[in-house]
Structures are given as C-alpha cells and as structure tokens.
C-alpha cells in the first residue's frame, strides 16, 4: 500500500538568514516528505523580542520560500495559535531548535515533536553586533 506523505512543520523568524537557519531547515526536511515553515510576523517579533526584524516578514517569507528544501510557507501571527497551525497544515512532525527543548511537548497529541541541536557559534544577534562593530 502506498505510504501517506509525511509533513514536517517548523517555525522561526529567520531574520538575516544564515547557515544555522539553512542547516535546521535541511535537517527538518530529512524527517519527512514535505516541509512547511511558519515565518513569524513582524508584529509577533516586536511583541516577543522588543524589536522589529532587520528584514520585513515579506522579505523573510520570500527568502525561506525560495529554498530547495521548503515546500510551503505561512505567516505565524501568534505563538498561541501553534496547535491550530499544526492541524491546519497537517503536521506529522513539529521540528524546533533545542533552544525550545521541552516547550512544545504539549503538541505530542497532534504530531511527533522533535528538537534539533542548534548550529554552534552563529546567530542573527551575533551577526548584527559583528556588522555594527566593523
Ligand atoms: N537555529 C539553529 N542554529 C542557530 C540559530 C538558529 O539551528 N545557530 C534555528 C533555531 O533553533 C530555529 C530556527 O533556526 O529552529 C529559526 O531561528 P530563529 O529565527 O531565531 O527563530 P525564533 O525567533 O526562535 O522563532 O514559534 C516560535 C518562533 O517563531 C521561533
């Protein structure tokens, strides 16, 4: 019998896109047949991190959507809607970086929850600080 395609869903801001972002998306894609990415809205970032991203949500969505490993993207408007997003996009697996380890275990009833190790020594904040110091 043909196997149902496995959908992987992940979330992130992906501001000042770097190789750590690429690696987590590549590893997420390997866990299934289809990768769907929720890109956090500018307003969500402002609420969550107290600053607007360097690249607008339109630009961040365009960058993530253009990646070979990404099949579909949507805007993550609010952290509270995670369960609805998972159901709506037919998630079989939720992938998050291990900076969120344990935080999304409550979604185990709708899909498998996997935390992947972050790529060491790279972050959007470090890149912004590095450029500011040049
Ligand atoms: N990441 C990584 N290695 C790094 C930096 C980031 O693996 N060196 C991963 C993060 O763990 C995350 C993804 O890249 O899985 C996106 O990172 P951010 O843009 O920092 O995402 P964040 O602001 O944590 O948004 O609903 C949750 C939020 O939308 C997550």
Image: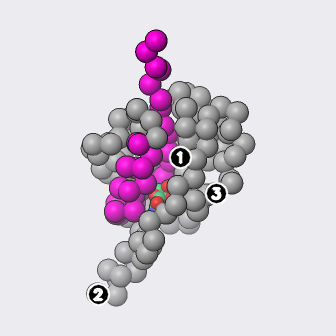
Q: Nearer the viewer, mark 1 or mark 2?
A: 1
Label ID, residue 21: none
Q: Quadrant of residue 36?
A: top left
Label ID, residue 101: 3
Q: Earlier in the sequence, mark 1 or mark 2?
A: 1
Residue 106 left/right relative to 18: right
The residue at which mark 2 appears reads as 134
Residue at the location (40% across, 33% down)?
A: 34
Residue at the location (35% across, 35% down)?
A: 71
Q: Which residues are magenta?
A: 1-30
The residue at which mark 1 appears reads as 95
Q: Nearer the viewer, mark 3 or mark 2?
A: 3
**x and y percent of residue 81 in the render?**
62, 39
What separation in Å lies between label 3 and label 2 (alpha carbons)? 34 Å
- Within 10 Å of the Cα at label 1, are there few (<14), some (14-19), or many (20+) other Cα atoms? many
Residue at the location (45% across, 71% down)?
A: 120
What separation in Å lies between label 3 and label 1 (alpha carbons)? 10 Å
Q: Quadrant of residue 128?
A: bottom left
Query: Is residue 53 visible from the viewing direction of this image?
Result: yes
């Amino acid at each position: 019998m043909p196997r149902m395609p496995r959908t992987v869903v992940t979330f992130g801001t992906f501001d000042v896109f770097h190789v750590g972002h690429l690696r987590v998306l590549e590893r997420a894609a390997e866990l299934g047949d289809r990768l769907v990415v929720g890109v956090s809205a500018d307003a969500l970032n402002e609420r969550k991190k107290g600053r607007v991203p360097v690249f607008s949500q339109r630009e961040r969505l365009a960058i993530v959507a253009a990646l070979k490993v990404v099949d579909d993207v949507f805007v993550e408007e609010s952290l509270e809607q995670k369960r609805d997003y998972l159901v709506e996009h037919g998630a079989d697996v939720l992938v998050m970086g291990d900076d969120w380890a344990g935080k999304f275990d409550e979604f185990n009833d709708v899909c498998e929850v996997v935390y992947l190790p972050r790529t060491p020594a790279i972050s959007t904040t470090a890149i912004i600080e590095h450029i500011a110091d040049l």
